[in-house]
Amino acid sequence: MTNPPHLPATPGTAPATPVAAAEVFSGAGPGAPASPAVEPPVSAGDGRELGSRAPESATTAEGGDEALVRLRMDLAYDGTDFFGWARQPGLRTVQGELEKALGRVLRLDPPPSLTVAGRTDAGVHARGQVVHVDVPAASLSAVEGRRATTPSSTAQRLSALTRRLAGLLPLDVRVQAVTEAPEGFDARFSALSRRYAYRVGDAPGGVDPLRRNEILWYPRPLDVGRMNAAAARLVGEHDFAAFCKRREGATTIRELQRLEWAREPGGLLVATVVADAFCHSMVRALVGALLAVGEGNRPVEWPGTVLVNAVRDSGVSVAPAHGLCLEEVRYPAPEDLSDRARRTRRVRTLDR
């Protein structure tokens, strides 16, 4: 049995010396910041772990009677130079940059706190991330500027806020839209599903250098048929403890709704992974297991056996972060948002 292939050294660095299989797939990818030594605690903005509570809607500020408005923000970011989503002292994170910009534009000190649909790790990208934030309704007037002669509508103010953020945020994070959230909307708990894509190139010459920060190069040929046969054994509601980094008091039961690979016309391999929620490192652990099957290093039945054993297997290598992107977060109709949030907050168990 052979180890997974060694990844090429990041351009501009000294060639890597041979490393163990677990080390090969532990990095965040080309150009990504090193992971912090201490992982931040899970917050209410974490899209992975269930069971904590958050307010269902914004009404009044704590300790006062100032009216609040809940905003939904749709955003995208290149995770290469971020230490993940979650705010961390002294580190550059997506949450930290966005909260800082919001506080500056809306003149709020301290800045407002964001709740995210799915917290991403260092080096992971997002094309369809969703957050919500509760801000004083009066603060939106700050976007009008000094030359405004008549009050703007809420829609006009939110459009202006989007433009102001575009001018203030770094180019590797973009707010695509800001809207007033419907009653009962919670970016994290109201979500029906999250869809991720993992991109892999197995061409002998490597991947397009202009896309090196979003595609994993795998220098051995991969068999899509074998990978999909193995993936089919993992779909459904299961305890994914074997593919998750455990957190104290958190469940690892998830409903994996879709897991399949497709080879695009240019040869790029894309895994589509959809679940109601994901626990820590779940997507990349699943991808790592299927890559081992795809190159013939493991039998098709192996990932399913690992799942049933419900124990972390040293043979499962977590795929690098840079190939992963959060593509979409789906929500129910507005009238079903509150009910979905209540059901999501319940900690699940499997009936045996």
Image (cartoon, rainbow, N blue to C red):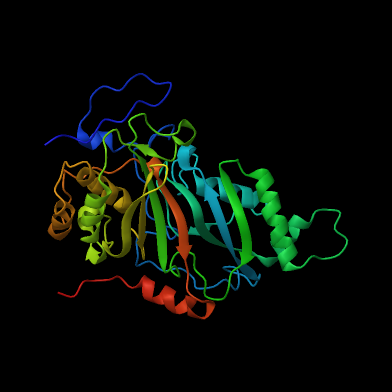
Residue at 26% in and 57% down: 248
112 on left or right of 352: right
In what quadrant of the picture does the N terminus appear?
A: top left
Q: Nearer the viewer, residue 24 or 115?
A: 24
* Whole-percent x, y for residue 133 in the image: 56, 61
Q: Is 166 rendered above or below residue 249?
A: above
Q: Nearer the viewer, residue 74 or 267?
A: 267
- Asked which quadrant contains residue 137, the reply is bottom right
Q: Is 306 rendered above or below residue 191?
A: above
Q: Can residue 235 be seen? A: yes
Q: Residue furthest right?
A: 149
Q: Is 239 rendered above or below residue 324?
A: below
Residue at 48% in and 50% down: 126
Residue at 47% in and 59% down: 328
Residue at 62% in and 58% down: 177
Q: Is 277 rendered above or below residue 323?
A: below
24 on left or right of 211: left
Q: Can residue 91 be seen? A: no
* Whole-percent x, y for residue 316 in the image: 20, 45
* Whole-percent x, y for residue 286 in the image: 27, 51
Q: Residue furthest top?
A: 14
* Whole-percent x, y for residue 25 in the image: 28, 38
- Asked which quadrant contains residue 305, the reply is bottom left
57 on left or right of 221: right
Q: Nearer the viewer, residue 260 or 274?
A: 260
> Tag count in the figure?
0
Q: Nearer the viewer, residue 147 or 31?
A: 31
In what quadrant of the picture does the C terminus appear?
A: bottom left
Q: Residue furthest front?
A: 265
